[in-house]
Amino acid sequence: AQDAGVSAADLRIPRLPATRREADAISQLAPPAARLEALDFAASRAAATDPALADYRFVHFATHGFLDSQHPELSGIMLSMFDEQGRAQDGFLRAHEVFNLKLNADVVVLSACQTGLGKDVKGEGLVGLTRGFMYAGAPRVVVSLWSVNDAATAELMTRFYRGMLVDKLRPAQALQAAQVSMLRDKRFSAPFYWAAFTLQGEWR
């Protein structure tokens, strides 16, 4: 995540090669008729605000997060900055826009860096993506509290979704099980790789 300006020109955006692997692995766990994928150029702001998202139990974003500490309502996640013809497009989904979404998802997952951070504003509480997605209708939001490792996050998220979709665990149980399994994996045992993610909202 970055303390961000509002234009793509202001940001140096490293590629996240493991996010495609993450998306493909998660997608394979769901029946074809029960999933909607928006990858590469299709991962646009229009796709992220499509009313059809209200039909899905799980909504997953694997991308960059960006932070604006002065105006936290302008923090958000980054989607495709170009369409299939190579034309520039608005690829930012900001926190204040998330409030206008209509979702029925059991859980929204923000597999991006520092998506859980917001600003405590007197009288308003936490201003951030978490609150935005909850207001939009999601009782649970999985977010990260610090910049996360791309490859480790892909592995964690695959295990998390396997817990929910295959083992039929509740989201909080599935996240805990995925994190414990990472702890026991010599490749990812350091908390840096898996402890950033937390489930906000309804834990049961």
Image (spheres, helix red, strand yellow):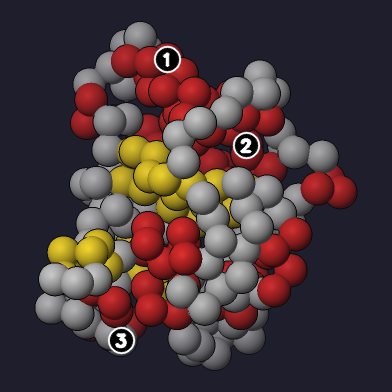
Q: Residue at x 69, y 43 (%)?
A: 27
Q: Tag 3 or tag 1, which sits nearer the N-term? A: 3
How many other residues sit within 10 Å of disc 3, few (<14), some (14-19) or many (≥20)?
A: few
Residue matched to label 3: 7
Q: Is residue 178 left or right of residue 102?
A: left
Spatial separation of the CA atoms under disc 1 and disc 3: 39 Å
Residue matched to label 1: 181
Labels 2, 1: front one: 1
Give the percent coordinates (x, y) of residue 128.
30, 65
Q: Residue at x 45, y 49 (%)?
A: 141
Residue matched to label 2: 25
Give the percent coordinates (x, y) of residue 125.
23, 64
Give the percent coordinates (x, y) of residue 75.
29, 72
Amino acid marked by disc 2: Ala
Q: Is residue 155 left or right of residue 129?
A: right
Amino acid marked by disc 1: Ser
Spatial separation of the CA atoms under disc 2 and disc 1: 17 Å
